[in-house]
Image (tube, rainbow, N blue to C red):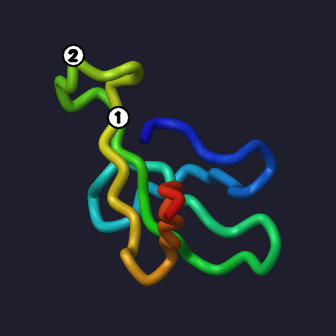
Amino acid sequence: FFESIPGAINRSEDNSNGMSRTEITCAACDGHLGHVFKGEGYKHTPADERHCVNSISLKFNDETTE
């Protein structure tokens, strides 16, 4: 996936630790979700971004029906 649900996350510039990245947080509780890194050469994706998201913050729903 390459996009978030509209209004679900907030983005803020994070230049700590000598890196240029975007911190993403939950729009509802302000919890830290991870970081987005831009311009690393991902040319075969809709956006040249790498999303480094904490796995505990993801919820996968099975869309199959039985």
Instruction: Name which quarter of the figure residue 8 lies in.
Output: bottom right
Toward the front, the furthest residue is 66
How dense is the environment of label 2, judged by Cα within 10 Å: few (below 14), some, or many (20 and up)?
few
Q: Which mark is residue 14?
A: none
Label 2 to label 1, Cα distance in Å?
Answer: 9 Å
Name which residue lies at 33% across and 59% down.
52
Under circle 2, the secondary element is loop
Q: Mark 1 and mark 2 in contact (Cβ < 8 Å)?
A: no
Is 53 left or right of 25, judged from the image as shown? left
Can residue 65 be seen?
yes
Give residue 50's position: percent from left, percent from top.
Answer: 30, 43
**Residue on which disc 1 sits:** 49
Quadrant where the N terminus sits is top left
Front-most of residues 54 and 62: 62
Q: Nearer the viewer, residue 12 or 5?
A: 5
Residue type at mark 2 is Lys
Q: Give the percent coordinates (x, y) of residue 2.
A: 45, 36
Query: In the displayed structure, does residue 8 sit left or right of residue 34?
Result: right
Q: Which residue is mark 2?
A: 43
Q: In the image, is residue 36 above or below residue 60? A: above
Task: Sort mark 1 into few (<14), some (14-19) or many (20+) by Cα contacts within 10 Å.
Answer: some
Name the residue at 33% across, 25% down: 48
**Horizontal arrangement in the rendering, residue 7 relative to residue 5 (left or right):** right
Q: Quadrant of residue 55?
A: bottom left
User: First in sequence: mark 2 or mark 1?
Assistant: 2
Q: Amino acid at mark 1?
A: Glu
Q: What residue do we see at 41% from left, 49% from top?
A: 36
